[in-house]
Image: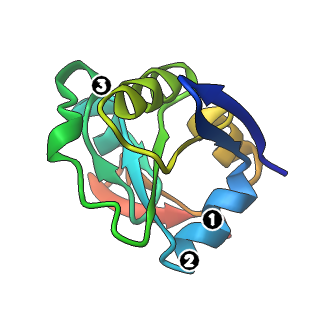
Amino acid sequence: MSTQESINGVPFDMMTPHEVRAALDAHEIVLIDVRTPAEFAFERIPGALLAPLSELDVISLPSQTGKRVVFHCGTGKRSEAASRKAVEAGFDRVAHLAGGLAAWKQAELPLITTDFSTGQPKRVGR
């Protein structure tokens, strides 16, 4: 179950991998990967959009109309920083994937990786 803290009085959720998966499948969230383009190319969560933290302009993020923005990275540190940045910019429905992609992989959830024998993307997980 997700845990919640507050950033300047705005609720901020730390969601589990299964909560993110369910919300993504239900089209309730916009999932933003804040890792580098190279990390994203190597492995990524299906449906995630790329917005590297080093270049993150929260004003240009997709509209929150009806959806929460959920950030993720490798371990949760960069996504937490992105969440704080979004709240400071006025976003009021923000969360991040607790434990990042490492937690997602540990939960054996779907992932797009690179098949090094062909260079093509392949889907793994359930």
Q: Name the disc covering residue 21, or none.
A: 1
Q: Residue furthest right?
A: 1
Instruction: Identify the colour scheme used.
Output: rainbow
Instruction: Identify the amino acid type marked 3.
Output: Leu
Q: Position of residue 3 (x, y in %)?
A: 79, 40
Left or right, 96 with reference to 19: left
Residue at which label 2 appears? 25
Looking at the rendered structure, the kind of residue marked 2 is Asp
Relative to 112, residue 92 above or below? above
Whole-angstrom CA distance, mark 1 to mark 2, is: 6 Å
Question: Along the line of sight, which residue is nearer the eye, 58 or 97?
Answer: 58
Q: Nearer the viewer, residue 125 or 19?
A: 19
Q: Earlier in the sequence, mark 1 or mark 3?
A: 1
**How far from the left and from the top, in percent, is residue 115?**
39, 53
Q: Are marks 3 and 2 in contact (CB under 8 Å)?
A: no
Camera-nearest residue between 8 and 107: 8
Which of 15 and 12 lies nearest the eye of the viewer? 12
Badge 1: few (under 14), some or many (20 or more) residues near its Cα, within 10 Å? some
Picture disc at residue 53? 3
